[in-house]
Image: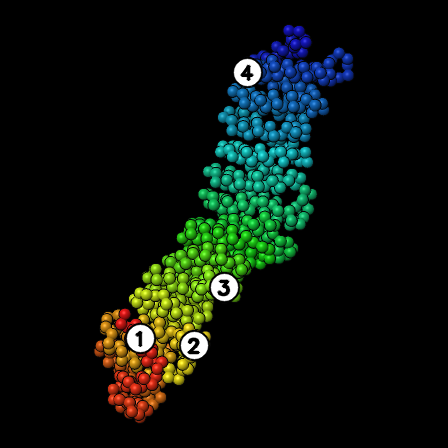
Amino acid sequence: MTETHHPLPDHITKLLGDKLYDRRKLGASFLEEMVKEALSDSPGHGGPAQIQKVLECVKRDYLKSPQPNHRKGGLIGLASVAIGLGKELPHFLQELVEPTLALFHDEDPRVRYYACESLYNISKVAGDAVLLHFNPIFDGLSRLYADVDADVKNGVHVLDRLMKDIVTQNPAQFQVAEFIPLLAQRMTAMNPFIRQLVLAWIRLLLDLPQVEMVAYVPEYLEGIFNFLGDQARDIKHNADACLQKLQECITSSKDADGQFTSHEKALKVISKTTRIVCKCCRADDKDSRLTALYWLQKYVVFQTSAMQQGGEKPTEDWVAQLPDLVSGTVHCIDDPEEDINRMAVDTNSGLLDMVHALDSEIAVEQLVDQLVLSMQSKDSMVVRIACLQWVCMLLGRNPSQMLAKPMLPKILTPIFETLLHPENEVVIAAVAVLARIMEGRNKEEDEVGGEDDANLFIVTTRQILQLVLSEHSMVETRGQLMIRQLCGHLDARRLYVTIARAIEEEVTDTNVAQKLVQTFNWILLTAKETTSVREELLTTTPLSEMPCEDTPGTDGAPLFLELIEPWFHSPVSALALCLWSQQYELATELTNRFAGLDPTLDFLKQLDQLVHLLESPVFSRLRLHLLEPRRHPDLLKCLLGLAMLLPQAAAFNILRERIHVVHSGLLLEAAANDRSGAGNNLLSLSHSDIGGNRRMAALLERFDAIAAQ
């Protein structure tokens, strides 16, 4: 072979292809000297052109040879060429690196080992110049890091350390923007060795302020979170360490010189990574969820601090991601891991406060959609309560949007469903939201569904009533809880009037109507939330003195008139209402009509409960009225009538003892003197008395009609 086709002397050619390592090494040393001579100024040595021929010869005759020893010799030869080139190496670096990396895939493990060794020597000579070829080198490293051969692994580890040293010493020359896509691609590998390599490089680059790793966080953050779910403890530990360092880099807001800058840069990074962190809150691995939630908590704290101290608003992109933030947080609130659910509760509270204080526009509709989805997809008590807290806050923050036509039905449907939840705490929270809606609509004066439904207070109250009608068991299981909560949040008088009218107009099932009235009446007479209603009833004018224009449904109508007719669906409740409102004459007439009712066990039980209620502190005023027989003769008639209706059991004995406190004869005489011309029958009024009181006559006629149903 002539020198034109084979630029290497015969002795070098033979030595490079020898089966013995020492002889190949000797041939490489001769090749190194040959390269140095070619670069010298002496004439006849060929210069760079000769070196190019040598490289082509080595690649053709050795690196591509089917003989492993030839490929090994060629790799040693490339390293020798690099050493011989010295400072001229950068001009030939690509011709040296590419063929060496190609043999990283060789089937012979010894060839792969020599390829690592050769690239190590080339890189050591090239220094920072090799960083121009960092991506293909890292690609080769990641492939050999999982090699089955121990020598190859050792060789690639040595090469990896050298590359890290070069990057550490020359961070400004490192092209991070070009490296990140490759890094993200390698993070998808399941091999634990490759994962360790990736994490080690991330940690190294994060420690170099001159390398802007934080700017590219969105491209590799999810991969690190995924590593937290790895079964290998070392990988989990290193991934956690990377995430801690990364968050420190984000929130510390340092520039390349290590100096603190404004929050603006950090806020932008937070905006870009929020959706990724929220997604990781739903990871199967508990460590991933816990760490992601910790990041969210730090984000919320950072944003809140920036608002309060620096007056810096969150970016529009971050505000637009509030639905994702809420979704990620709420998802973890009922997590089986205590550490996670406790942190989720704290994060949710901080997020609520931050959004409430935010003066920017927020994506209310998208946020509501997410809350509705969470409520409907999870039956958890804490999730429902958290979502209801958000709805309540939004009603206060954005009432016009929340109470608009498209939005309101979307909110009401899941809230009414929540009223059926088995946990009382959820029902209480749902009622609080309903009360807020009713109050808000009253202020906003918006329309709901048409002219007839202009007042949301009435509409919502009737929807609650319809829910009760469809779920009859709610009256007994949740009735008192819901009504008391509504009375506590709203105008109790208005609520009772609205319910009373709805019972009259919409309830056709007499049994349901009776149970509703019994429940509302018991709360009316006993609950602290209805104190104002009871006090108003005490000021009711006697029926005989009420103006004719005072009729139910008119403005300024007495509360007693608004309630009494619907209360007729439960005769005993109507009697209790009369006794409390001091309408003793009507109470007496009702008692007289009780004799015509079917004395069912339930009816007698209600009478028994009424007697015990009359003995309670709330009816102390009525008992004192027994000491004034001339002023309240009808009260005694009523109680005597009750005594006649009751079987001789405990309630009868209680009532009898109460009546005997005052001498019966004296009371009867006082009644006779006070009502001259009255008949001897204590249990009825004369026809003329009733006729003289048209309002009472009308009420009694209405009672008879309802009782006959």
* Mark 1–mark 3 distance (CA, rounded to whole Å): 36 Å
Give the quadrant of the C terminus: bottom left
The amino acid type, in three-letter code, at marker 2 is Ala
Q: Residue at x 39, y 76 (%)?
A: 561
The amino acid type, in three-letter code, at marker 3 is Arg
Taking the image as shown, residue 307 lies to the left or right of residue 695, namely right
Choose between 134 and 368: the one closer to the eye.
368
The amino acid type, in three-letter code, at marker 4 is Pro
Q: Nearer the viewer, mark 4 or mark 1?
A: 1
Answer whether residue 528 is visible to the viewer in this image: no
Q: Which mark is residue 33?
A: none
Which residue bears the numbered disc 3? 441
Circle 1: element type: helix
Which residue bears the numbered disc 2? 557
Circle 2: element type: loop
- Comes first in the chain, label 3 or label 4: 4
Which residue bears the numbered disc 1? 703
Which residue bears the numbered disc 4? 68
* Mark 3–mark 2 distance (CA, rounded to whole Å): 24 Å
Q: Residue at x 71, y 23 (%)?
A: 88
- Marks 1 and 4: in contact by CB < 8 Å? no
Circle 3: element type: helix
- Marks 4 and 2: in contact by CB < 8 Å? no
Q: Nearer the viewer, mark 1 or mark 3?
A: 1
- Comes first in the chain, label 3 or label 2: 3
User: x%, y% of residue 302?
Assistant: 59, 52
The amino acid type, in three-letter code, at marker 1 is Phe
- Comes first in the chain, label 1 or label 3: 3
Give the quadrant of the N terminus: top right
Circle 3 packing at 10 Å, graded few (<14), some (14-19), many (20+), is: many
User: x%, y% of residue 604?
Assistant: 25, 73
Circle 2 packing at 10 Å, graded few (<14), some (14-19), many (20+), is: some
